[in-house]
Image (tube, rainbow, N blue to C red):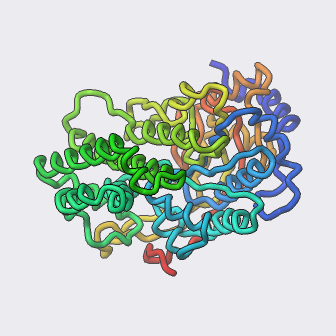
Amino acid sequence: MQSYSDSPDTVTAWLRGRAHRLRTLDPDDDDDTDLEPLLDIVGDARVVAIGESMHRVHEFFALRHRVFRFLHRRAGFTALVTESGLPEGRLVDEWIRTGRGSLRDALRDGISYGFGACQEMLDQLTWMRERTATGRSAPRWYGMDLPDSSASALPGVLAALEVLDDADPHYAAHVRTTLLPLFGYLPDDRTGLAQAAPTIRAYLALPAPDRARITVGIADLAARISARRREQIAALDGDAAAERRVDVAIRAAESARAADAFLQAMTAGSTRTWPAANIRDAWMADTVQWVLQREPRIVVAAANGHVQRTPFSAPPFVPDPMTTMGGHLADRLGDDLVVIGTAFGGGRQWLHRPDPGDPPGHSRPFIAPIGSLDRASLDAAIERSGIDDAVVDLRTAPVAAEVVLDATTGWHNGDVIQPGRASDAFDAVAFIRTVTPWRTWIDDRGLDRP
């Protein structure tokens, strides 16, 4: 097989000549002429998926913020859809649309996985709110992920109940007395960086009959709220606002059902003799399509491992390649999907690990240098060309360069290589030469401080 070293000049010459340099990553910079090539890359696609090589990186937050601003202003993209819980995301969208409530509450409670605990996300939401408040436009925010950082179904149930309390109160009372108490297993302390781990462990420790009761209760909730859509809209005055409210509640109930299936699959993990199913990515793909019924054009932001079209694998932890969100969307949307992955040349990363004295679910942050790039990786191939921050349209690569890039081992997800052919996975790659940690207010004990 041909390797990078067989023809470095071909790749280097192409990258130096055709890569679209990013003059800045600052979303507040008024000059966006360097982003003009994105319009050709995006074309008429309704979905632009932007990846990130690792989470909690300042430059990746800034890149997607700047790109979303540009596509919102210039190309009619109306919504940002993120790797965060769908039911929780209502709090963020509500703040953007109305300004009611606290921005810090929206960042903490409306964005899962703790991704809202940073200046970058605060700046993103503030800009979206300013656009709405001044009447220039009304960008929308959606979470597309499973609720509760993929650790429980409870937020989906609670979001559905907010509507059922008004639209179907007798049934809502039934759910509150029969289903909600079954979530009493959840740990009392949910403040730690790694709170999802003890939350999932608590679920797995439930007796099988208790888990089954949760499954039955959620299935009944999701089926009923969907079947009574028309009656619930009528009970809420029957207008467009009522229709939107009920549809969001139906989707929230479905998020609870998907989260329950995701957790149930874990119970058979140690004895399963069949390949795993990527329930989470299938749910996110379904949600993107649900959003597309409501928005003309959207930007989807998630890890490279979710947006890539090619199957995801991470041996030895994920030995069987699994269909990603990007794979599902590629099958369903065709040319209406453009995928922009990320690559990097080096830098520092924000990580966390438990201290021996920490209670369950708590973890201490630390900053570490990123290890040396795999010399056979896509990231290293781009880094060796010497280009600075840039967007590379892989579809314009000459055959010789494409062959070399496709022969790389894959792309970095942090320090780990995700195997795959770049041109199959991505339409374009945004290369950031040096990455740095996000600007977070999480303290040295791993707590989200006000």
Q: Quadrant of residue 381?
A: top right
- Judge by depth and name the residue closer to the eye, 177 or 215: 177
Q: Quadrant of residue 94?
A: bottom right
- Decide: is 231 above or below 200: above
| Relative image position of residue 196 (x, y in whole percent) | 35, 59
| Relative image position of residue 299 (x, y in whole percent) | 64, 46
Q: Determine the residue positioned at 24% across, 55% down.
A: 171
- Judge by depth and name the residue closer to the eye, 296 or 189: 296
Q: Determine the residue positioned at 48% across, 54% down.
A: 242
Judge left or right: residue 234 versus residue 176: right
Q: Determine the residue positioned at 75% across, 63% down.
A: 135
The answer to whether residue 45 is visible is yes
| Relative image position of residue 30 (x, y in whole percent) | 86, 61
| Relative image position of residue 246 (x, y in whole percent) | 43, 51
- Judge by depth and name the residue closer to the eye, 224 or 383: 224
Q: Quadrant of residue 441?
A: bottom right
Judge left or right: residue 211 versus residue 36: left
- Decide: is 114 above or below 434: below
Judge left or right: residue 295 versus residue 358: right
The answer to whether residue 185 is visible is no
Q: Determine the residue positioned at 58% across, 44% down.
A: 294
- Judge by depth and name the residue closer to the eye, 208 or 161: 161
The total of numbered circles placed on residues is: 0
**Quadrant assignment for the N terminus:** top right
